[in-house]
Amino acid sequence: MPPKNGKRLVSQQSVNAVVKSICDIMRRSNCAGAMQYVPELTWILFLRILDEHENRDAEAADAVGAEFAPSIEAPFRWRDWAAPMSAKRVELQESTLGAFFDFVNGQLLPYLRGLKNRPGATAKQKVISEIMTGVERVRIDTERNLLYIGK
């Protein structure tokens, strides 16, 4: 099955290239220094890598006929909102100006921060929620720059 979340981060070189690309985007945004963009880079990469791990776990469970429950539901997984050509991303891009920021700041981040409070929250969901607790909003200055990160 081809990756649904953009290019896979399968080697140190691919991770390095993504990190450099995101840092370049953030430097041309309002994130002028590392103190501003490192936290942003961290949560963005965390969500992307989490999605890749969960995709592999789902494939492994499917191969042996086991059940798999993702930690993050659609449309809040990386592959749903950030990956190129994903349905939610396309919907947001074709919507009004500000729709992408509104989704990330108004729906995605509150959903991720609230995972620990859900009935029956798993240990992984609680960790995700704790990691995202410090992320109040996207610090990238334009939707265009935020969209470039998902490539």
Image: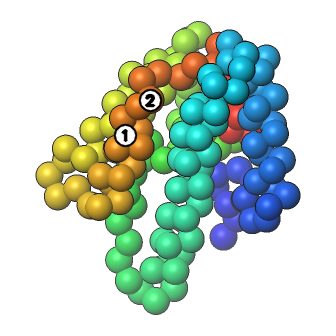
Q: Residues within 10 Å of mark 2 (few under 14, many from 20)?
A: some
Look at label 1 and name its amino acid. Leu
Judge whether 52 appears above or below 20 on screen.
below
Under circle 2, the secondary element is loop
In the rendered image, the quadrant that contains the C terminus is top right
Q: How crowded is mark 1: few (under 14 residues within 10 Å), some or many (20 or more)?
A: many
Point 27% across, 38% down: residue: 114
Q: Name the residue under label 2.
A: 135
Identity of the residue furthest to the left in this view? 119
Picture coordinates of residue 4, whole percent (x, y): 64, 55
Point 54% across, 75% down: residue: 59
Q: Name the residue under label 1.
A: 112
Picture coordinates of residue 126, whole percent (x, y): 30, 52
In the rendered image, the quadrant that contains the N terminus is bottom right
Kindly tell me whether residue 89 is visible in this rendering: no
Identity of the residue furthest to the front in this view? 35
User: How many circles with numbers are drawn on the protein?
Assistant: 2
Identity of the residue furthest to the bottom in this view? 64
Judge whether 122 appears above or below 105 on screen.
below
Judge depth for marks 2 and 1 and give the one in front.
2
**Contact between labelled residues 1 and 2, with CB atoms less than 8 Å apart:** yes
Displayed quadrant of residue 122? bottom left
Picture coordinates of residue 82, whole percent (x, y): 60, 39
Point 59% across, 40% down: residue: 42
Kindly tell me whether residue 125 is visible in this rendering: yes
Q: Which is nearer the eye, 63 or 42?
A: 42
